[in-house]
Image (cartoon, grey):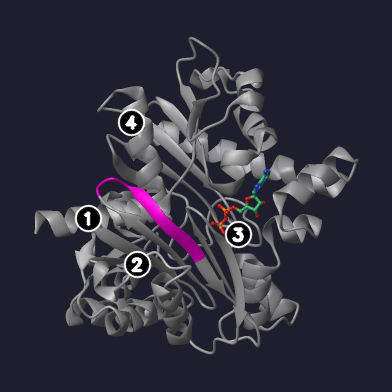
Amino acid sequence: MKILVLNSGSSSIKFQLLTMPSEQVVCSGMVERIGSEISILRIKTETQNIKEEYSLKTHKDGLQKIVDLLLDPEKGVIQKPNEINAVGHRVVHGGDSFADTTLITPEVKEEIMEFATLAPLHNPHNLQGIQVSEQLFPQAEQVAVFDTAFHQTIPVKARKYAIPNTFYSEYGIQAYGFHGTSHKYVSEKAMAHLKKEKSKIISIHLGNGCSMTAVRNGKSVDHSLGFAPSNGLIMGSRSGDIDHSLIFHLVDTLGYKLEEVNQMLNRKSGMLGLTGYNDLRDIQSEAENGNLDCLLALEMNAYRVKKYIGAYAAAMNGLDAIVFTAGIGENSSLLRKMVCSHMEYLGVRFDDVKNESGSGSIFEINADGSEVKVLVIATNEELEIAKQAYSVLSTG
Ligand code: ADP
């Protein structure tokens, strides 16, 4: 079965075509800057690396271009659109309606649109991807995989805010959690590695967006992102945890507009706000050259992660493994070391050499005999989406 995985963002569509259940990647790529004068289409197949420029005004134009290239007699990988049996869509917000991956029906689309009020930057684009894909692949099954689904198991005591009950019951105000596909994928890999079904794992996803999940016996029981993807850890350009009263101070006392504060907290804060750099590689090399803002930002970042590790170990009454994943988690040995040093009280004994030299899709960076394993696991959200779509289709 061939499954096309689509991740439709505001101005981009990422895609991957996989053969399932063998998990073989036929091709992958993305269209960027949809709506700009020049859009870029990249596609990687087993034999080619293609980059082409077009003017693509809409998501439909973008997806059509991807399909044209997939079908191209010379550069393509399939002969007819109906070779694609299913399309798996990443959908950011499934509210509290979707605890699992689901076949897309008109009712499901309506709900995805309803949850657009909770994820205005994501769900409308995800839905657009679904609508365009239905037109281009009318014979394929369309499947939605929700970022929020994995976190539906978080108990109410951990997901509810201590504000009047009506906000929860009438408006669904609660912590929904995000990055669920990634946390599910890496925590399952960690469980297989531990060879333990009953396990207490903390999964740390550090990319542009950053989050942590406490995973007990394979289920998410707490998570650092909340109602929106802005709570918790210090991210590329988002602040993570702040005292909400600073918003009122900025607006009421200092005269900022609410929208300016929103932009500041989501787009100008985090590592960018602290250092002027968004990319951790730049921040690390600046810190090495003596830039004190960069050094402090790294310390703040690692400290925040460390605090959440302590909180989640307490929530689970113990810990078997810590997992680092995503762009920063998989690549920054420096941040991993800053997080994991001085955690002997928890049973973590770190190994510097393994941390520096480890490679591959999964490796340990704890010392031999460490009570708690520290693992680096490459996340693969596209594969997880394809696996879940395949599972929904094969179980009926
Ligand atoms: P996204 O959340 O967009 O999927 P990624 O998981 O791809 O993000 O992570 C992107 C971030 O990973 C970059 O902003 C960069 O800071 C960081 N990163 C990538 N490679 C390295 C590296 N070799 N060392 C340190 N940080 C890295």
Between circles 1 and 3, the one closer to the viewer is: 1
Res 243 label: 3
Residue 345's x, y, as percent? Answer: 54, 19
Q: Which residues are magenta?
A: 21-29
Q: Which badge, 1 or 4, comes first in the chain's sequence?
A: 4
Res 191 label: 4
**Callout 2 crowding tier (Cα within 10 Å): few <14, some 14–19, many ≥20:** some
Q: Residue furthest front?
A: 74
The alpha-carbon separation of the residues under discs 1 and 4 comes to 21 Å
Q: Which badge, 2 or 3, comes first in the chain's sequence?
A: 2
Q: Which badge, 1 or 2, comes first in the chain's sequence?
A: 2
Mark 1 touching mark 2, by CB under 8 A? no
Q: Kindly state the secondary structure of the residue where label 4 is placed.
A: helix
Res 78 label: 2
Residue depicted at x 34% and y 72%:
167
Q: Residue furthest left?
A: 396
Q: Pointer 1: what residue?
A: 390
